[in-house]
Image: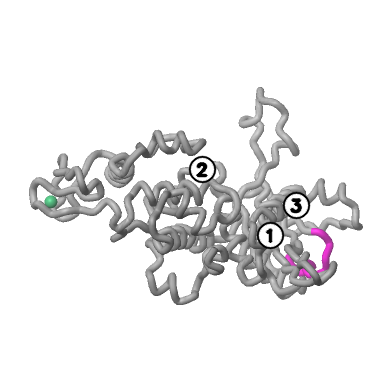
Amino acid sequence: MSKLSFPKSLPDFQRMFPDDGACATYLEGIRWEAGFVCPNCSTAGEPWRFAGRPGVLRCRSCQRDTSLTAGTVMERTHSPLSTWFWGAYLVSSMTPGMSAVQFQRQLGLTRYETAFQILHKLRAGMVRDDQDRIGAKASHVEVDETYIGGATKGEGKGNHHKTLVAGAVEAMQRSKADTEGKAAPRRGGRYAGRLRLSVVPNRTAKSLRGFVEASVAPGAMIVTDDWSAYDKLADRGFQHLAVPERGEGEVAEEYLPLIHLVFSNLKTWLLGCHHGVSPEHLQAYLNEFAFRFNRRFWPFNAFRSLLGIASEKSAPTYAELYSGEWEHPNLANGS
Ligand SMILES: [Zn+2]
């Protein structure tokens, strides 16, 4: 069951998970690859099943019920499993921030609050991940910063509301063996590995070095432009190549192509968010972008990660959801 290929379209998805029973079978297959074992009495063997309650298995030996959603984001939910699966599929594979209203319509949910809660819980799964530092296994890490946003109606051009974002992306090298006999890979076999993005207050050494030290593993080789804020990286335990940009595009294209491509795609994606992105909400969008980017080769991992399946991550509690500790922009403005 875990060897399934990720559905490439909504109809594909519907064929794979047509109803709650199919979702339950999938959950069961992930948890017990070799068949059900009762968590209470450790008896292995086919459990009792109930037509009206696909999320519950009852041990034939001790009669105890086991919930398939225990420990997942769906635990104690009143919404059907298929609603959660649809939601996770939409969130893990769709472009710009979907609003709770769109989500409610797509899933045919009666209550807006249900859509709100499901979307909120799924998106919270994008925030907690990705805390470790990148670059240890990369050929090097490209680091740069860019301004996001800024054009606000009626205020003219300039730097109003522009937010500075720092990015670090792993440059991976495909081995000769991987590429032999295939068409010549772009950029000499170089491709992007994992990505970290963060809002930073300014372009000072303190801000940018702080970002690098939080995002990149010590000892990694870092490539930046020759902005002075990056000067002391070698003293901080990194290998560092500062490339003089001199305002020439070709230099950047040669030494920092991956991070520039990331920034370009990020800006295109943010433009697609119909509400615009205010500075205080930008980090949530950056997390969402990086979450999908880092799993683009493994979309099923993204899907499972959001549902809280096959990982130790537990769902955010109600207290966390509503304490204002984390708020998703589209949900925050109630659209
Ligand atoms: Zn049992």
Residue 155 lies, in percent from the top left, at 81, 72
Q: Is residue 34 left or right of residue 260?
A: left
Q: Name which residue lies at 24% across and 46% down.
A: 54
- The relative height of residue 32 versus residue 324 in the rendered view (above or below) is above
Q: Name which residue lies at 56% across and 45% down.
A: 296
Count neighbours of disc 3 (C-alpha within 10 A) and say few if under 14, some if 14 to 19, many if 20 or more: many
Residue 167 lies, in percent from the top left, at 68, 60
Q: Is the CB of mark 3 within 8 Å of ligand 1?
A: no
- Residue 331 vs residue 144, the one in the foreground: 331
Q: Which residues are magenta?
A: 225-233
Which circle marks residue 298 in the picture?
A: 2
Residue that badge 1 annotates: 167
Q: Is the CB of mark 2 within 8 Å of ligand 1?
A: no
- Residue 276 vs residue 310, the one in the foreground: 276
Q: Give the mark, 3 or 2, whose residue is nearer the N terminus.
A: 3
Is residue 251 covered in magenta? no
Q: CA distance from mark 1 to mark 3?
A: 9 Å
Q: Callout 1, which amino acid?
A: Gly
Q: Callout 3, which amino acid?
A: His
Indicate the quadrant where residue 75 lies: bottom left
Which quadrant is home to the C terminus? bottom right
Q: Callout 2, which amino acid?
A: Trp
Q: Secondary structure at mark 1?
A: strand
Is residue 230 covered in magenta? yes
| Type of secondary structure dominating the magenta stretch | helix
Q: CA distance from mark 1 to mark 2?
A: 22 Å
Residue that badge 3 annotates: 260
